[in-house]
Amino acid sequence: MVNNQDDTLSATFHALADPTRRAILAQLALGEERVSTLAEPFTMSLPAISKHLKVLEGAGLIRRTIDGRVHQCRLAPEPLEAATGWIEEHRKIWQQQFDRLARFLEQTSGPAAPDHSQEENT
């Protein structure tokens, strides 16, 4: 069964999968920005940028405030912190697996065979 945390992680990783959305998050890491300012570096329409922002907003990665016609966006770090925790937990598991494999290979290969390629034939 999928729980709410899995849904949140899925939405976060889906949002992070797109390079445009990662670039938007990088801009927002520097501070709050207007949507029009966020759109400037990209060669796509404002509606296309708005779709990217909706994905980020849906994942909880950004928060948008509206004052009249001005839309401001800011970074919301909580989903990134949850994703970082998930990645770190799984990194530790895989590191343990690699460490066990290394120990196993050291035990089964025995001592290194001497290298006789440099010996002179007499």
Image (spheres, rainbow, N blue to C red):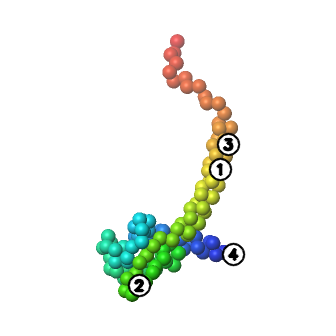
Q: Give SS at disc 2.
A: strand
Q: Say if mark 4 contacts mark 1, CB within 8 Å.
A: no
Q: Give SS at disc 4.
A: loop
Q: Earlier in the sequence, mark 2 or mark 1?
A: 2
Q: Residue at x 37, y 86 (%)?
A: 69
Residue 67 is tagged as: 2
Residue 66, image quadrant: bottom left
Q: Which residue is farthest front?
A: 67
Mark 1: amino acid: Gln
Whole-Å distance between the Cαs marked 4 and 2?
A: 41 Å
Residue 3 seen by the camera: yes
Q: Earlier in the sequence, mark 4 or mark 2?
A: 4
Residue 104 is tagged as: 3
Name the residue beneath numbered marker 4: 1
Name the residue beneath numbered marker 1: 96
Where does the image place residue 42, in percent across and percent down from the top left? 32, 72
The nearer-to-camera label among 3 and 1 is 1
Q: Say if mark 3 contacts mark 4, CB within 8 Å.
A: no
Mark 4: give few (<14), some (14-19) or many (20+) Cα within 10 Å. Answer: few
Q: Earlier in the sequence, mark 4 or mark 1?
A: 4
